[in-house]
């Protein structure tokens, strides 16, 4: 707590008003919650508080530049709500699911969603591999600081609808991660992948995103076979119940 007290949340930079628009006050409240409740509950480290705006909120909010209009989004491993909450504040046209396995984090996320009146956001507790079949496939999967790209894709890509995309906020090693993961991505049904720079003129340095686009079989052949087997099992159980 000493570190938290000695590192107060700085005022919001002027660019935050431009990025968050009429939800600026809500963005400030979210930043305050992260700096106070988030630190107390161990969701973020106290050393992150001085750079919450530049490194976290704004860096995540500019992801909106590459998310299509009016789509469904699943934020995998949402943690304290990054990038899902900032994205939700700037894009009320999206339907966003915050997916997180840890109870203390989902409790915080639900509190934030209710406090900020984010009616287009839902919180689901669970791991990506656990919600397959129960969570409707989405157009876009987002993630930040969850896992190396090949492992992250194994969790996130199967959650996509056909021809959906995964957008992973990454750091300086994005190009190397993508190169190392290309074979794994192809096996998961990816048809294209690229590294994008977003937030030019708004965040410094610009944020880095790895975009992975899938074809008609998100998750690849193995997942398609698993899905088909589950569907056959469901049909056979229904048939037995009707007898």
Image (cartoon, helix red, strand yellow):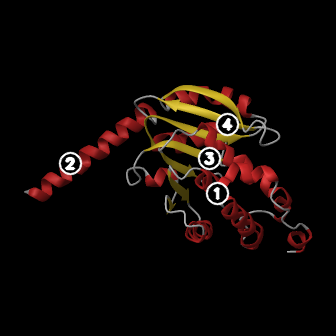
Question: How busy is the neighbourhood of tag 3: few (under 14 within 10 Å), some, or many (20 plus)?
Answer: many
User: Which part of the image, by quadrant, shows the C terminus?
Assistant: bottom left
User: Which part of the image, by quadrant, shows the N terminus?
Assistant: bottom right
Q: CA distance from mark 1 to mark 3?
A: 25 Å
Question: Which residue was labeled with disc 4?
Answer: 209
Where residue 159 sits in the image (x, y, percent)?
46, 44
- Marks 1 and 3 close (CB-CB < 8 Å): no
Q: Earlier in the sequence, mark 1 or mark 4?
A: 1
Q: CA distance from mark 1 to mark 4?
A: 26 Å
Q: CA distance from mark 2 to mark 3?
A: 34 Å
Question: Which residue was labeled with disc 1?
Answer: 22
Circle number at residue 143:
3
Q: Secondary structure at mark 3?
A: strand
Q: CA distance from mark 2 to mark 4?
A: 40 Å
Q: Quadrant of residue 222?
A: top left
Q: Earlier in the sequence, mark 4 or mark 3?
A: 3
**Does residue 18 appear to the left or right of 132 in the view shown?**
right
- Marks 4 and 3 close (CB-CB < 8 Å): no
Residue drawn at (20%, 48%), measured in percent from left and top?
Answer: 235
**Does residue 121 appear to the left or right of 43 in the view shown?**
left
């Amino acid at each position: 707590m000493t570190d938290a007290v000695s590192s107060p949340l700085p005022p919001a930079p002027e660019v935050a008003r431009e990025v968050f628009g009429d939800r600026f006050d809500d963005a400030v409240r979210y930043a305050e919650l992260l700096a106070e409740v988030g630190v107390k509950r161990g969701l973020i480290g106290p050393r992150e508080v001085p750079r919450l705006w530049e490194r976290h909120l704004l860096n995540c909010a500019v992801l909106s530049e590459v998310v299509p209009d009016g789509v469904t989004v699943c934020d995998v491993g949402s943690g304290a709500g990054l990038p899902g909450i900032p994205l939700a504040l700037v894009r009320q046209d999206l339907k966003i699911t915050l997916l997180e396995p840890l109870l203390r984090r989902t409790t915080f996320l639900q509190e934030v969603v209710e406090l900020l009146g984010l009616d287009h956001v839902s919180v689901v507790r669970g791991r990506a591999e656990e919600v397959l079949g129960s969570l409707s496939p989405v157009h876009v999967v987002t993630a930040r600081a969850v896992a190396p790209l090949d492992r992250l894709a194994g969790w996130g890509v199967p959650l996509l609808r056909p021809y959906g995309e995964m957008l992973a906020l990454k750091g300086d090693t994005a190009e190397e991660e993508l190169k190392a993961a290309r074979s794994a991505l192809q096996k998961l049904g990816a048809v294209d992948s690229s590294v994008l720079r977003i937030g030019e003129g708004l965040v410094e340095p610009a944020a880095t995103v790895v975009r992975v686009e899938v074809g008609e079989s998100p998750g690849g052949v193995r997942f398609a076979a698993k899905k088909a087997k589950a569907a056959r099992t469901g049909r056979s159980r229904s048939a037995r119940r009707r007898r």
